[in-house]
Image: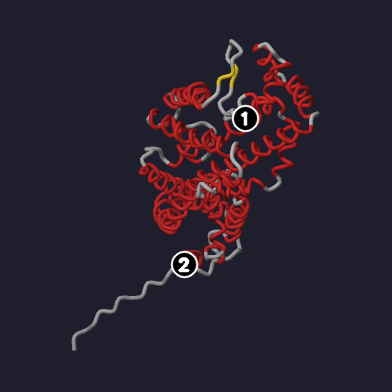
Amino acid sequence: MPKVKLTPIKQKTKQEEVKEIIQSPNDPLAKYPLRAFGYSNEVGAAVSAMPVWGKAAEAALWVPALMYLGADIYDKYRRGKEGDYTKASAFSAVEQAIFQALASVILPTAAVKMGQNIAGYTAKFDGSKLTASAKEEMFDRLLDEFDNYNFAKGDVMDRDGNIKTGFDRVKQRIIQEKLKPALSSTRNDLKTEGWFSKVIRFFAHSNRPVASAQTKESDVIAFVEKEAKKIFDRQTLLENSSREQIAALDDKKLLKHYDKAAKNAQKRAQLLIEQKPEFIIKKILNSSAVVYKGLIEEISAEYKEVSDKRLLVKNEIASENMLKKLMAKNENKELINILAERVEISRTALRNYIKGNSMKLGLLKTAGGFIALGCLAVPIDHFVHNYIIKKFVEPGLQTVQGFHSKLSFKQNKS
């Protein structure tokens, strides 16, 4: 019978056994659901694309992530190299800190941002040629212009004291006077931007139109002009139509915005009259509705010269006094209250319209961020642990530890 050569079973060293213990799923901080707390900041990064509350949620979701990271690093420090909590080790804490920094902060956040950007590129295929980020920047700009009453039916006083109305003035104010200089300035700054600033911008948020500045300017201008025209036309419609007239258009979305905006509109209208008298006077002077003809005539009788009218709409006190004089008559008061109420309904409805567009883009980018995180979270964990930690960090720390031991030995010997 031939002899069979038996290979002796290699006994595991204590260090190998400890490593198996540390890497085993018996570590509660390495298992889900606790491990999921390490990704709460990535969840925050994903939802940060949502308008209004996204950035606040991102900041709040850093709290559980930092608590988890601190607990895990401290746990590995207490475990020590032996893994039995008998001797704490700063090197184990450093190793785990590097792992968590890469596997729970930097690389997953980069994956989320990458997913958001990829999803954002799909927004270009609607014919606009703008990414979701560029569109968000432009909707934010339009909302800011709208909140600052720069869509006030395009009314403006020229140098001769004549009031110009219409969309052309809105377009000039928003695009020529503000948007184009902002895009040009941002493009110039991006040309001299250093790599460190680029990294920060990739992970953080910018108040500048960076995505738009990196897009062909003619496409950005065309998109803003189209959306501004929609806002302007809807504003004109809502300010000059009754609910019945709006309902007759068979536009359910617009009617829904109208009904929602109509709630508490009277209260908001009174605040508008008190706080923006010059805006109300502008609206009266630029209205083509026959019903406001009497009000315009009274203002014209008070301010016969065009230059006086210019001063009127530019001076809050003069506008306030004029408005009080008009509202002293009951019939005028009723007309002005109706005007202010329609203006407030229009403003609230249109703000919801603009925010709704931003919300859709935010959902698109958020979905992309979550998909990327879901697909790459586990591979990132394995990549950092098996490649970066095992091949680079551990050998480096062992070298440092060896050098430290030799230095301590020499000092003790001397």
Q: Secondary structure at mark 2?
A: helix
Residue at figure coordinates x 71%, y 34% from the top left: 335
Residue at figure coordinates x 68%, y 21% from the top left: 297
Nearer to the camera, 71 or 380: 380
- The quarter in which the C terminus is drawn is top right
Give me the disc on residue 20.
2
Tell me which amino acid carries mark 2: Glu
Name the residue at the right extreme: 328
Q: Estimate how packed mark 1 is, as few (under 14), some (14 to 19) or many (20 or more) residues with alpha carbons within 10 Å.
A: few
Residue 90 is situated, as x and y percent measured from the top left of the image, at 57, 52
Displayed quadrant of residue 338: top right
Q: Is residue 197 left or right of residue 61?
A: left
Residue 333 is situated, as x and y percent measured from the top left of the image, at 76, 33
Query: What is the spatial separation of the Cα atoms under label 2 and label 1, in whole angstroms?
Result: 86 Å
- The quarter in which the N terminus is drawn is bottom left
Tell me which amino acid carries mark 1: Val
Q: Estimate how packed mark 2 is, as few (under 14), some (14 to 19) or many (20 or more) residues with alpha carbons within 10 Å.
A: few
Residue 406 visible in this rendered orientation of the protein: no
Contact flag, marks 2 and 1 (Cβ < 8 Å): no
Residue at figure coordinates x 74%, y 36% from the top left: 334
Residue 48 vertical placement versus 285 (above, below): below
Residue 381 is situated, as x and y percent measured from the top left of the image, at 45, 57
Question: What colour-coding does the image apply?
Answer: secondary structure
Residue 260 vertical placement versus 156 (above, below): below
For disc 1, the marked residue is 290
Residue at figure coordinates x 46%, y 40% from the top left: 133
Nearer to the camera, 404 or 273: 273
Q: Nearer the viewer, mark 2 or mark 1?
A: 1
Q: Secondary structure at mark 1?
A: helix
Displayed quadrant of residue 306: top right
Residue 296 is situated, as x and y percent measured from the top left of the image, at 67, 23
